[in-house]
Image: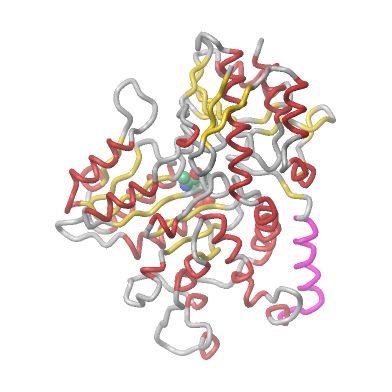
Amino acid sequence: MQIENASPRGKRHFMQYENTLAFARRMDREDPLRAFRSQFLFPKHDDKPAFYFCGNSLGLQPKTMRRALMQELDQWQQYGVEGHFKGEMPWMYYHKFLKNQSAQVVGALPEEVVVMNTLTVNLHLMMVSFYRPTAQRYKIIMEAGAFPSDQYAMETQVRWHGYAPEDAIIEIAPRAGEENLRNEDIIAIIEQTGDQLALVMFAGVNYYTGQFFDLESITQAAHRVGALAGFDLAHTAGNLPLRLHDWGADFAVWCSYKYMNSGPGGPSGAFVHARHAHNPDLPRFAGWWGHDESERFQMRKGFKPMVGADGWQLSNAQIFAFAAHKASLDIFEAAGMDNLRKKSLLLTGYLEWILDQVNPDGERFKLITPRDPAARGCQLSVLTDASGRALFDYLSENGVICDWREPNVIRFAPAPLYNSFEDVWRLGQLLRL
Ligand SMILES: *Cc1c(COP(=O)(O)O)cnc(C)c1O
């Protein structure tokens, strides 16, 4: 069977998949990123490495992480408070050491990104600056079925400004009988909402269906009607190459513990487009770390924000979390997002093909992730019938770590940094039953 895959730049090439161990192993041997797998620690199942397909929830631990954390413990031991100024990576400047690599991952200028806090916190901070409703223009458009934290954030932001969520929040749902949003529908609703629209706040990749939205055209449509566009990239950063600066997004936030492998509760990143960087009048909730660093320690009255995303920082850096994140960013820099995407298209394409092989009539489950590779990242979500929970339990008992989302969806996310074609083939063998 011929499978068509879109390359990151839209070129197409053909891959002839086969459902054999020999084929999977050949793909692994020919994989230019194959060496990265050995840089990660796999959970064990019956003394063997598990088949880990859960990088969309919590990425695996890079082997370099322990040393990165030890280095900061040593620094603390050796210097105490002077660790802020001494050592290889003085804590005082730690957020800067993450800047260039984070900018690479999301396609931004370095001044447009900062690592700070956690995701939902940053979403609220961005809303303070970029959701400025007026009597005329107060509506927010988001995708129906967004991650609950985002729903709660939008609901409470709207209420805090005195509006009713039922009125102010427009959720776009798929058409009847469909699983995914059509871009034309998103654009049409943005245009219809027109001068009532304050903000489009969308996920990059929907956590449930795995659909990757067209962030550029959504941003352009929002701007055409005079609104702003912000994105939650929790399932997108480290999953797909992004061009936030060129696409013109106003703001974005993401976490580092899913595809970015920075450990449970890892820090968040935030993006503020350069067009907002030099606007000290943008309202914001400030803290000392966002204050002009040349005067930060003069401890004077009067907040003067740093230029760019740095001006949204509140607190001094969470060194241990940031050190873990740095270890992970080093791996992303070495691998390169475009290379990861290239492998991801093949690997997720292989999983899709294998799922079709073991479920040819579509009777046992149904793929709810778009079939178009350009409209998805690593993750494939399958909608199961009543026997789905039993299938999930059976996979777990056989060493597959994936996840279950109520009411009956199983999500598989082969991550190109550490998953192999053999992993996917073995999953297919288990699913044959
Ligand atoms: C994972 C995820 C979150 C989690 O938020 P935290 O503040 O990091 O706990 C929020 N939003 C989306 C879309 C997510 O996928």
Where in the figure is residue 253, as x and y percent of width and height?
A: 47, 55
Q: Residue furthest left?
A: 136
- Seen at 41% across and 82% down, the residue is 303
- Seen at 55% across and 34% down, the residue is 379
- Depth check: give the residue in front, 70 or 301: 70
Where in the figure is residue 49, as x and y percent of width and height?
A: 79, 33
In the image, is residue 409 above or below residue 164? above
User: Which span is picked out in magenta?
Assistant: 65-81
Q: Any magenta on residue 79?
A: yes
Q: Is residue 392 left or right of residue 28?
A: left
The quadrant where residue 124 appears = bottom left
Q: Is residue 110 left or right of residue 39?
A: left
Q: Quadrant of the C terminus?
A: top right
Q: Any magenta on residue 260?
A: no
- Seen at 60% across and 16% down, the residue is 390
Query: Mainly helix, strand or loop, the magenta region?
Result: helix
In the image, is residue 21 above or below residue 343? above
The quadrant where residue 130 appears = bottom left
Q: Is residue 279 left or right of residue 105?
A: left
In the image, is residue 418 above or below residue 220? above
- Seen at 64% across and 71% down, the residue is 94
Where in the figure is residue 230, as x and y percent of width and height?
A: 38, 54
